[in-house]
Image: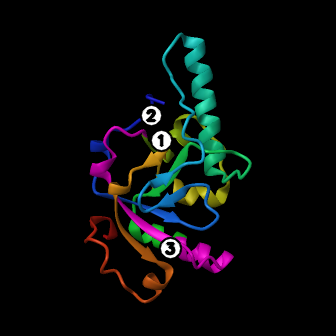
Amino acid sequence: MDTFCLSQADVHGSLYRVQYGDSMTTYDIYEGLEAVDTVTLYDDGGDEQEEEDTLQEFGDAVEQHLSLDTDYESIFISLFSQRRHAENWMLDRHTRFGSRNCTLLQIDTAALNGLFIFRAEEIVDKLSLSIPEAAQASVAREYLIAHYIPPHAIIRSQTVDDIYAGKNAPFLIDSDLA
């Protein structure tokens, strides 16, 4: 995993998580966000063959996650780099599935120090992963965090109703809206 791992300093400002009822990622205001699989690690240390095998397994895990494979227990939590994109994704999900229990969470990247952070597009491109066409539009703005996000990193939340009402006040001013 180290091959693609970013430092917290590589990801500036805020990231955004769309949390919804049937998501594989669980959310609790006291525990934070937690992936289904919080144990698996892909260690790319070792001899050349071990590194190649691990890279293949890691790529398979990313591919399954981005394909929304419900039979797969993912280690990843998906986040978007642009608030507007996250809002649109959330509203689309609400429209298609009637999910009123969607929440948009703003994540302070300064609080992600020491976590495994990945840029989805970089992994997809370098490993030539095959993902569904519907997912391709989001990958350029998607980050993957392994295992969990602590509660203190979640600094704001917004519901579907808040977005429809135009209530953006809970969010800080974002440079990513330009």
Give neighbour class at mark 1: few <14, some 14-19, many 20+ (Cα, 10 Å).
some
Residue 169 position (above or below residue 12): below
Count of all numbered marks drawn on residues in the image: 3
Q: Which residues are magenta?
A: 90-116
Q: Quadrant of residue 176?
A: bottom left
Q: Residue at x 55, y 57 (%)?
A: 26
Q: Are marks 1 and 2 in contact (CB under 8 Å)?
A: yes
Counting residues from the start of the chain, the first of labels 3 and 2 encountered is 2
How far apart in space, not on screen, are marks 3 and 2 (Cα)?
Answer: 28 Å
Q: Which residue is labeled 1 in the image?
A: 122
Q: Residue at x 55, y 18 (%)?
A: 51
Q: Give the numbered dot on residue 88.
A: 3
Q: Amino acid at mark 3?
A: Asn
How far apart in space, not on screen, are marks 1 and 2 (Cα)?
Answer: 8 Å
Counting residues from the start of the chain, the first of labels 1 and 2 encountered is 2
Q: Quadrant of residue 93?
A: bottom right
